[in-house]
């Protein structure tokens, strides 16, 4: 089965085989407020873990998304072009940002699981 | 994403859903409410064939346009009375400094004297062309030169670049001069240090100059952390950009140490002069080690804000940077004045030209009239009254609101949302409730170094009665918030020409112009 | 002092509440070595009479355009501004309002901006326009940087017929960004290394042409065509840049609603295709609804701007041209479709008459075939001297091109002359007569 991992930068990656689906956490969308636009990467682009891969814009803020894993972008979520509010309503499901072929599955070890992330968020206060 | 970039400072961008309605129900037949009129768009009012200007008839002179004629434009036609009425009605939907206190921190909303307007409109200033022979505009160039003298004297700096059109433009000018100087000395460097509390234009400008930005945190006293700054200093730092007094309204008391530190690694000190209103006659930035500073004529020197512009941002420069000032330069000839318009000869080191022509002359006339009206004694009094008024507001509110820092402030007082904790009222809500009380809110959510910032700058233009009314109202609002009267805030504003607007909708589905076939917002969805 | 409401009694009361002995306590924080003693070395306060007298003297030393025959253009144009415009912009609520950050109490400014943006889009023939920039030249620099962002290419080619102030502003503003910029005439073939081509129409010499073929060439190569217009009134007579295929249009809007003012404040208009809107610099005003469902306006797409995006902003711009855009909007509302077009043609007709009169003077050769209200003539000797001699006849007879292009030696004898609706046939006759005398 697939497992979802979380980064300290509030991104999640759900892995299925060698493909990861990446998005921002529900906590993150709540912090951002109404999301109005997302700048997504292009299919075929190669990203390094920690590099800026997307920008999520709300009315009053613009947040860079740093890829939690390295790899090649397979697909960006086209639905977000018309309906950016999907990231608000379903951040950890239909509001996914992009799919990526993992260059190094070992990178997942550095990420938190769902419980670990929940604890992390609580600690932020 | 970083937590800071989420900028999660509780800002609702849609009307409160509990009280919003789509009905647009009006209390009156017309939709007008007494003297407050609803006004349609000029495109909805106009019609074909009408015109508000009488122009001479065309004759049958041959065309030299080679058939490249204009297609239809789609502009509405209206008579003069209709146009006048349209804009008069629109004007009534605006708050203005002429109508009440405008306590926007960092903006210096002071009185805009009408003498300045009168003098700017003298034909000898308003009706002269920048490309006339300079012999025919000697009085104009002399005015710019005289203003330059006042700016240099107030700041204690030897040189000033007059052409930048606004503060941000001046920042660009100053940083470019620094980079040009470093390049001329063989080492452009790569980084600029900018406090976390800086205005957004600072890092944006540094980026335009090809520099990477390194942020310096504030210390618990609200000033830039000198130790942190020194840690980041290295021979690859081109400059430090500081605002003084800073965006928290505090004088950077270690400013001379900052200057020494940046100079010791061969870098330069850029000062954002937005808050100059606090220190005129009390200190000169030239004596603090500053190498370049822009001055917002539309802040400190009263040129009107006009709904967002125009501004003017001349930049005072140290001896080292003067050679890199943008053209044109004013030169004193034996017989008078001339303009050196290209980056050649004496101006070969100039960074070049930053805009067309010579600078914001209309704002120069206004600013000089303001300065001459105040004089050395008046300008010092301006700063003293500005600082006195801000401290009066601070002292009068500190027991019911939460000042972010201890001690006296300069010309603006910074509070944060701490006093609203557990009240159910945010900084945004508090600001909107001020509108119902007849006040324009203070600056909110800036600077970013505190949560829910409220930055209050009364300026020297407020009478004590005006300050007292403001203070009393703020005390009443604070008391209301503590008492749990949440609706006074979350439903606000109730009495303004519009209630809270749906900014989310405006950003998700941008409608940036009228179109002939567009449905009106009321009819949509 | 008339602008300062606080009296000494007030100040003492305020100090009392603050708990300070004197205002000096509030300035203790200034490093002692830097504290000033005594007043700055500047004159003391003056009343209105004295200030008026002093500045009036300076004003009287200048030869105003309206004082005699005047034919100067080259990027700033003298047009008649109806009396209502200046009256309306001086209403307190327009003149002394701030940027509309609290939209509920700024609907006046915001609705004006929405109307302004629409007017700019209409006259340029484009999809969307911003709420103004400092002037045409800085708008041009912003357009170039935007083209680089949009295409992700580094090569910028500017036409050599672009106003040198615009060329220089682009070169200066973008000098530290990684771009390859050049100014060339004739233009090279557009290729896929180019982000954009920047052309001016009418160009700095006054020439008007159809840019459609160039637009096609740009688009085939994936480059943007940026069109610069320095005389906004020309848009009332000439096919729009949008209709010719422009991707970004920048205009000096000074000619509508705003006087000459010795070069500033002016008004940068900036318009582009819809698909590029999120890369546009400057403020944008958008339509929305309020909590009662009523139509209203707000600044929007702010995430592009410096106060949010900081070092990644599309531009560092904060202030716009505010009151100048209001003046523009009011003037254009008064003109309307018919008035704007007629104004443009009046300009053109006056320029044609001027051209006919000048080339009838022996020694004067016409250099511009197709023009709007500005054209170049060639004189038998350096134009700069001729312009100075024309002054003795009280004629401000155009701009010597050597002033704009000091580095060129092939246009020393070329003179750029401009006519607008503010010129009369008497002016034209006076100019031709003076020129004849000066050249004989």
Image: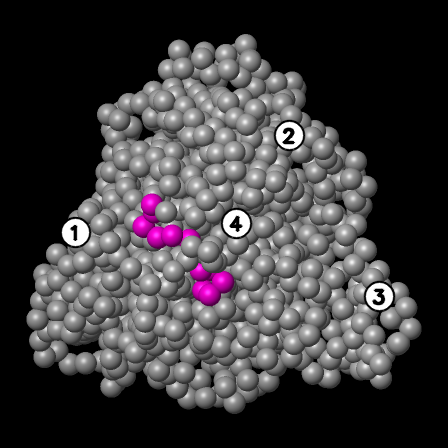
Q: Quadrant of residue C161?
A: bottom left
Task: Identify the residue at image location x=55%, y=13%.
Answer: C20
Q: Is residue B500 above or below residue B296?
A: below
In screen coordinates, is C35 left or right of C370? right
The disc at residue C417 is: none
Look at the numbered disc 1 and give the secondary structure of its residue: helix
Query: Which one is in front in this view, the residue at disc 1 or the one at disc 3?
Result: 3
Q: State the image coordinates of residue B366 (x, y, percent, origin top left).
A: 34, 38
The disc at residue B405 is: 2
Pointer 1 chain = C
Label 1 and label 3: CA atoms lie apart by 70 Å
Quadrant where the N terminus of chain A lies?
A: bottom right
Residue picked out by circle 4: B168
Residues tagged by mark 1 and mark 3 found on one chain of the structure:
no
Magenta residue span: B495-506
Label 1 and label 4: CA atoms lie apart by 33 Å
Q: State the image coordinates of residue B338 (x, y, percent, origin top left).
A: 40, 45
User: A51 or A27: which is nearer to us?
Assistant: A27
Residue picked out by circle 3: A113
Residues tagged by mark 3 and mark 4 found on one chain of the structure:
no
Q: Residues within 10 Å of mark 1 (few under 14, many from 20)?
A: few
């Amino acid at each position: 089965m697939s497992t979802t991992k979380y980064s300290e930068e509030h991104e999640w990656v759900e892995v299925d085989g060698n493909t990861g689906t990446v998005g921002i956490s529900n906590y993150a969308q709540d912090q951002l407020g109404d999301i109005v636009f997302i700048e997504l990467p292009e299919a075929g682009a190669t990203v390094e873990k920690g590099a800026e891969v997307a920008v999520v814009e709300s009315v009053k803020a613009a947040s860079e998304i740093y890829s939690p894993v390295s790899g090649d972008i397979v697909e960006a979520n086209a639905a977000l072009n018309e309906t950016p509010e999907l990231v608000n309503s379903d951040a950890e499901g239909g509001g996914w940002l992009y799919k990526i072929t993992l260059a190094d599955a070992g990178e997942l070890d550095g990420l938190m699981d769902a419980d670990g992330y929940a604890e992390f968020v609580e600690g932020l206060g | 994403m970083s937590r800071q970039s989420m900028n999660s400072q509780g800002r609702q961008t849609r009307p409160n859903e509990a009280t919003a309605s789509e009905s647009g129900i009006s209390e009156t037949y017309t939709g007008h409410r007494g003297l407050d009129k609803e006004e349609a768009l000029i495109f909805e009012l106009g019609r074909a064939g009408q015109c508000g200007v009488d122009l001479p008839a065309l004759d049958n002179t041959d065309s030299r346009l080679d058939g490249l004629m204009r297609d239809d434009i789609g502009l509405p036609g209206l008579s003069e009375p209709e146009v006048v009425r349209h804009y008069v009605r629109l004007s009534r939907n605006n708050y203005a400094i002429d109508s009440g206190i405008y306590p926007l921190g960092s903006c210096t909303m002071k009185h805009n004297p009408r003498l300045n307007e009168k003098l700017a409109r003298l034909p000898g200033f308003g009706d002269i062309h920048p490309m006339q022979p300079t012999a025919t505009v000697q009085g104009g160039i002399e005015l710019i030169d005289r203003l330059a003298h006042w700016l240099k004297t107030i700041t204690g700096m030897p040189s000033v670049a007059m052409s930048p059109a606004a503060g941000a433009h001046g920042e660009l000018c100053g940083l470019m001069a620094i980079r040009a100087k470093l390049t001329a000395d063989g080492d452009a460097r790569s980084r600029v240090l900018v406090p976390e509390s800086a205005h957004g234009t600072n890092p944006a400008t540094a980026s335009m100059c090809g520099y990477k930005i390194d942020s310096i945190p504030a210390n618990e006293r609200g000033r830039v952390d000198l130790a942190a700054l020194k840690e980041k200093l290295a021979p690859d730092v081109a400059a430090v950009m500081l605002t003084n007094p800073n965006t928290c309204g505090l004088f950077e008391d270690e400013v001379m140490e900052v200057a020494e530190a940046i100079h010791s690694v061969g870098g330069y000190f850029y000062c954002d002069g937005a808050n100059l209103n606090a220190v005129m006659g009390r200190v000169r930035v030239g004596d603090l080690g500053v190498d370049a500073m822009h001055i917002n004529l539309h802040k400190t020197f009263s040129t009107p804000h006009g709904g967002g512009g125009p501004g003017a941002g001349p930049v005072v420069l140290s001896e080292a940077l003067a050679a890199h000032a943008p053209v044109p330069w004013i030169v004193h000839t034996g017989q008078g004045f001339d303009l050196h318009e290209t980056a050649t000869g004496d101006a070969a080191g100039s960074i070049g030209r930053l805009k067309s022509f010579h600078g914001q002359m209309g704002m120069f006339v206004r600013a000089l009239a303001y300065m001459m009206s105040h004089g050395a004694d008046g300008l010092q009094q301006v700063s003293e009254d500005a600082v006195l008024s801000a401290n009066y507001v601070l002292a009068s509110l500190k027991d019911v609101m939460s000042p972010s820092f201890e001690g006296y402030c300069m010309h603006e007082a910074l509070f944060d949302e701490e006093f609203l904790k557990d009240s159910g009222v945010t900084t945004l809500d508090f600001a909107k409730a001020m509108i119902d009380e007849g006040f324009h809110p203070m600056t909110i959510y800036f600077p970013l170094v505190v949560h829910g910032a409220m930055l209050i700058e009364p300026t020297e233009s407020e009478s004590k009665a005006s300050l007292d009314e403001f203070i009393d109202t703020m005390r009443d609002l604070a008391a209301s918030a503590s008492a749990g009267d949440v609706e006074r805030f979350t439903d606000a504003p109730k009495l303004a020409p519009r209630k809270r607007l749906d900014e989310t909708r405006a950003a998700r589905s941008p409608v940036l112009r009228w179109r002939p076939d567009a449905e009106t917002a009321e009819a949509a969805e | 002092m008339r602008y300062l409401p606080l009296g000494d009694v007030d100040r003492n009361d305020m100090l009392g509440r603050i708990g300070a002995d004197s205002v000096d306590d509030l300035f203790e924080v200034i490093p002692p070595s830097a504290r000033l003693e005594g007043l700055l070395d500047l004159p003391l306060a003056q009343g209105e009479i004295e200030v008026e007298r002093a500045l009036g003297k300076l004003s009287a030393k200048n030869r105003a355009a309206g004082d005699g025959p005047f034919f100067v253009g080259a990027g700033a144009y003298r047009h008649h501004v109806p009396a209502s415009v200046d009256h309306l912009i001086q209403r307190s609520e327009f003149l002394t309002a701030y940027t509309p950050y609290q939209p509920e109490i700024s609907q006046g400014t915001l609705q004006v901006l929405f109307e302004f943006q629409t007017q700019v889009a209409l006259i340029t023939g484009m999809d969307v326009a911003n709420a103004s920039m400092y002037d045409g030249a800085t708008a041009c620099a912003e357009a170039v940087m935007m083209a680089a962002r949009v295409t992700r290419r580094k090569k910028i080619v500017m036409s050599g017929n672009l106003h040198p102030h615009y060329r220089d502003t682009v070169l200066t503003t973008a000098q530290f960004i990684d771009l390859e910029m050049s100014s060339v005439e004739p233009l090279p073939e557009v290729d896929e290394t180019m982000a954009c081509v920047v052309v001016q129409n009418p160009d700095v010499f006054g020439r008007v042409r159809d840019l459609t073929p160039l637009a096609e060439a740009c688009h085939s190569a994936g480059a943007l065509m940026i069109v610069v217009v320095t005389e906004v009134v020309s848009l009332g007579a000439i096919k729009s840049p949008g209709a010719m295929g422009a991707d970004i249009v920048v205009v000096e809007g000074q000619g509508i609603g705003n006087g000459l003012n010795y070069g500033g404040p002016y008004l940068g208009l900036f318009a582009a295709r819809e698909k590029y809107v999120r890369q546009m610099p400057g403020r944008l005003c958008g339509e929305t609804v309020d909590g009662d469902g009523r139509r209203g306006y707000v600044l929007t797409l702010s995430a592009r701007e410096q106060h949010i995006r900081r070092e990644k902003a599309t531009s560092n711009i904060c202030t716009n041209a505010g009151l100048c855009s209001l003046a523009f909007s009011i003037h254009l509302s008064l003109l309307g479709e018919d008035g704007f077009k007629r104004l443009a043609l009046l300009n053109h007709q006056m320029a044609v008459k001027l051209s006919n009169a000048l080339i009838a003077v022996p020694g004067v050769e016409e250099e511009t075939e197709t023009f709007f209200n500005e054209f170049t003539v060639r004189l038998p000797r350096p134009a700069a001297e001729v312009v100075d001699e024309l002054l003795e006849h009280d004629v401000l007879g155009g701009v010597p091109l050597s002033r704009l292009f000091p580095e060129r030696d092939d246009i020393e004898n070329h003179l750029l002359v401009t006519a607008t609706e503010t010129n009369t046939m008497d002016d034209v006759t006076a100019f031709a007569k003076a020129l004849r005398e000066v050249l004989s």
